[in-house]
Amino acid sequence: MTICTNQHRHWQSLESLPHDQGGHGRHKCCGCAYEKGYELGLTRAELLNINIDELPHSQAGSVRHKSPHAAFARGYYEGVEASYNGNN
């Protein structure tokens, strides 16, 4: 099992994500999910796949018990916005 040690685990912006303590995304890193979604959003990718199984685990900081699905969706949305604003 891979454990995430990236600083995004402590991003305060991820604290508002919905809680998710069960299901397939349990204990997966929402920061990694957000960043993956953001990268796909910057390119306005049309085929989206979060690949939950490939995300590292994290129980630290702001991402503890948060939804990786919601994090991915927020990242994608914010990446698309940034692609129009040239903020990539």
Image (cartoon, helix red, strand yellow):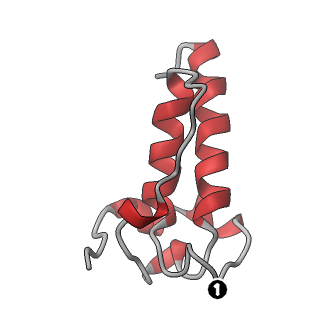
**In the displayed structure, does residue 86 sit left or right of residue 17?**
left
Please say if 28 is above or below 44.
below
Task: Report crowding for label 1: few under 14, some 14 to 19, many 20 or more residues within 10 A (C-alpha).
Answer: few
Q: Which residue is drawn at 44% across and 83% down?
A: 59
Q: Which residue is drawn at 66% across and 47% down?
A: 74
Image coordinates of residue 48 in percent, x first then y, are: 57, 38
**In the displayed structure, does residue 4 sit left or right of residue 78?**
left
Please say if 35 is above or below 70.
above
**In the displayed structure, does residue 56 sit left or right of residue 80?**
left
Q: In which quarter of the image is the N terminus?
A: bottom left
Image coordinates of residue 35 in percent, x first then y, are: 46, 46
Q: Quick one: 30 or 9, which is closer to the camera? A: 30
Image coordinates of residue 7 in percent, x first then y, are: 35, 62
Instruction: Report the label total.
Output: 1
Q: Quick one: 70 or 9, which is closer to the camera? A: 70
Q: Quick one: 75 or 49, which is closer to the camera? A: 49
* Residue type marked 1: Gly
- The residue that mark 1 highlights is 22
Task: Find numbered disc 1 in the image and state the secondary structure of the residue it sits on.
Answer: loop
Image coordinates of residue 26 in percent, x first then y, are: 55, 80
Q: Which of the 4 quarters of the picture holds residue 23?
A: bottom right
Q: Which residue is drawn at 53% across and 72% down?
A: 63
